[in-house]
Amino acid sequence: MNDVLQLKGRFEQKSSANRPGAPTLAANQKVSVQHLESLQKDLLEMERFWKSNDLLNGALISVYYKKVAAKSNRISGIFSKGKAANDTIVGAKFRENSEKHKHVITHFVTLQSVEHAIRSITRVMQILNDEFGGQVDTETFNNKGNIAKINFELYGITKTLFQQIVVDASYVEKFDLGEGSFNPKKDAIVTLYDTKTDVKELLRKLGIRVSADRILDEYTILLDEDYLEILLRDAPYLVAMAVEDLSEFTPSDFRENFRESAFEIPNPTNEPTIGVIDTLFDERVYFGDWVEYHDMVDENIDKTSNDTYHGTAVSSLIVDGPRLNPELDDGCGRFKVRHFGVATARAFSSFSIIKMIREIISQNRDIHVWNLSLGSDEEVNQNFISAEGAILDQIQFDNDVIFVIAGTNKPSTAPMKKIGAPADSLNSVVVNSVGINNEPALYSREGVVLSFFAKPDVSYYGGTPEKWMKVCEPLGEANVSGTSYAAPWISRKLSYLIDVMDLPREVAKAMLIDSALGWENKTDYDSIKLKGYGVVPQNIENILKSSNDEIKFVISGVSEQYNSYNYNFPVPISDEKYPYIAKATMCYFPKTSRNQGVDYTNTELDLYFGRVKNDKGDIITINDNQQSMESEDHPMNEEEARRLFRKWDNVKHIGEIIRPNARAKKVYENKLWGMSIKTKERLQPRDGEGIRFGVVVTLREMNGVNRIEDFIQQCSLRGWLVNRVNVENRIDIYQTAEETVEFE
């Protein structure tokens, strides 16, 4: 088998050459005076409501779109007084009770902006009546001559604002206060819209008093049942999100079959450490010396032996999984564990656990991989990420860590249900469970998240009645099943890739997902909702090596500007052709904004890889992705871009399907391949600046020829530093680096 290669070189940076032109109507659109009049009436009602309401110094107004709105389709003229309209967005969701996805985007604007919008719409209606007979269509509106002949000074409006408002109206159905069906029956974690008002002061006006220990961040608080009722009765329009705080654990399907463990284990030495955040741990087990245990549960809470079963079992797999389950030996050896007991086996407070996780990560920065096999029995919301998931995403954006999270369970006989928090964390690796036949376990719950994002990420063996997972619990060996016991195996693999093989976490995650995908390249919703991108290979060598007819290399870089590119990949040529099938997987850890609802990720990295066609750097990308190509206009529906190219997702996979009649590719004049990563921002222009990405590329030779040595030689000639990701060499380096040097 061939080693995976690590290429080290420089990605060049280039700002975007595109500059926005005059606003234009999309194909086959019409905007009438009647529609503008309807929108104006909506705004007049919003003005009346907010002028009579003294809670806020401004107005919360929701814009109801006709479809999933791309950033370029959001209103830009109607709320343009003062701030840019995009800067006033405080929330985004999909319309409830709608057959197809439609955006509802909430703005917080000044009353002056609303008044300006009402006056501007009046002037636009005048122009449509006087110049266009009360209605304008795409062909008429986009004709520059028709616009040029209008005397806009006469109407008291600029040409650009007129065009913007007409285009805005073509995408918008109505304006309203918004909608939200929140019905928590217990204490709830509530997130309010960002209205530039102190949360404590705002709630005090409603008769709700909140102490500092119940505030999670500047918009999120913990409210008891009585205060929640007041808020939802008197000011429901302030609430962006609300979820019950007290969560029941997801059930584990398991059969008790205890027998005392007779295992012995050597003392730990320089093995990597994985962090575990779980229920309590019993230090009397045979592998107790491998676990550094911290009890984080309030000493005033009663604890029983049942509280240690789950956490002890999870840590046993991380430390000694291959000994307990020899048929699942992954070749990764043993790992030390730093175990933090944050919950008992009963219901737990999400609010408390969020605060503890923040503290734990900040004080244990030497750990790169964290296993979290706790999960809620409640389903995730279709319109926003859970508070727990959002905190984990923020932690991973701010720190060089990665979380592995169990995909949560349901009773095997129960109907299908959505995954539970925190398995909606986008930056984390979420793991579902399969049986020995690689089919989803009956207790598996399904994604996707926010109706689009791919969760779970991958699947692994978690135990089923056909083949239970063996673990060590306080009373000895036990047979269990659940996604809780699939996640530790993935934590082991990621720690091996990051801590032993010294790969960046972005590359490690990309390699993991790429190995699960294989050559099937299935990334459609039906394929990923239960198994994610696929089942990860059992042995670590199957991730770190490729077959003899494959060239697999990994590369990492940093996005500093719009286009990060390198057009210098010397793919070997045979008979003046490229005899390869290609695929590539990219991962990155973006900044996220929970208060933006369904538009959760702030940064989009768009991956292009393929042959370089010309001196301009045009890439014939292997999946025909043309969303961001600068050479010509490639209009694409936003929903289509998400479905086909996973726009805004933080995992990108592009690939060709292996077909018996596949033909070798044409060689262009410069005989090189290129990679380009296009960076787009949803909110602030610099959110993605400095964001790291990792890509794994595989080239499969159609005729079975091993061309890796030729590739290595040509890469070296072109200035690449080429390292073989060789297991034996990296282990020697790791062990040498971990040795304690004693000075005399």
Image (cartoon, rainbow, N blue to C red):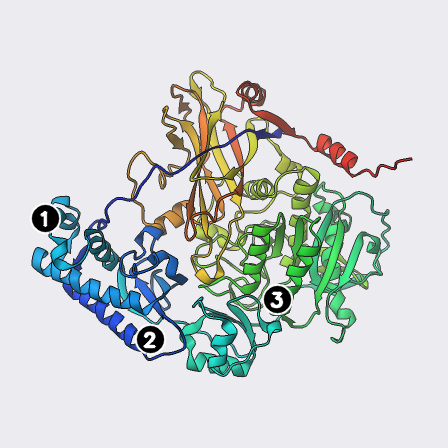
The residue that appears at 75% across and 76% down in the rendered structure is 300
Asked if residue 377 is positioned above or below residue 488 in the image, the reply reads below
Residue 50 shows which numbered tag?
2
**Visible in this render: residue 253?**
no
Label 2: few (<14), some (14–19) or many (≥20) C-alpha neighbours in 10 Å:
some
Q: Earlier in the sequence, mark 3 or mark 1?
A: 1
The residue that appears at 48% across and 50% down in the rendered structure is 527
Q: Residue furthest right?
A: 744
Q: Earlier in the sequence, mark 2 or mark 1?
A: 2
Q: Kindly report the distance in space between the C-alpha atoms of the residues bearing marks 2 and 3.
A: 43 Å
Residue 46: quarter of image: bottom left
Residue 149 shows which numbered tag?
1
Q: Amino acid at mark 2?
A: Trp
* Residue 538: x %, y % from top left: 65, 43
Determine whether the residue tagged by mark 3 lies in a helix, strand or loop: loop
Q: Amino acid at mark 1?
A: Lys
Residue 551 shows which numbered tag?
none
Residue 250 shows which numbered tag?
3
**Visible in this render: residue 685?**
yes
Q: Kindly report the distance in space between the C-alpha atoms of the residues bearing marks 3 and 1.
A: 66 Å
Q: Earlier in the sequence, mark 2 or mark 3?
A: 2
> How many numbered callouts?
3
Q: Amino acid at mark 3?
A: Thr
Determine whether the residue tagged by mark 2 lies in a helix, strand or loop: helix
Label 3: few (<14), some (14–19) or many (≥20) C-alpha neighbours in 10 Å:
many
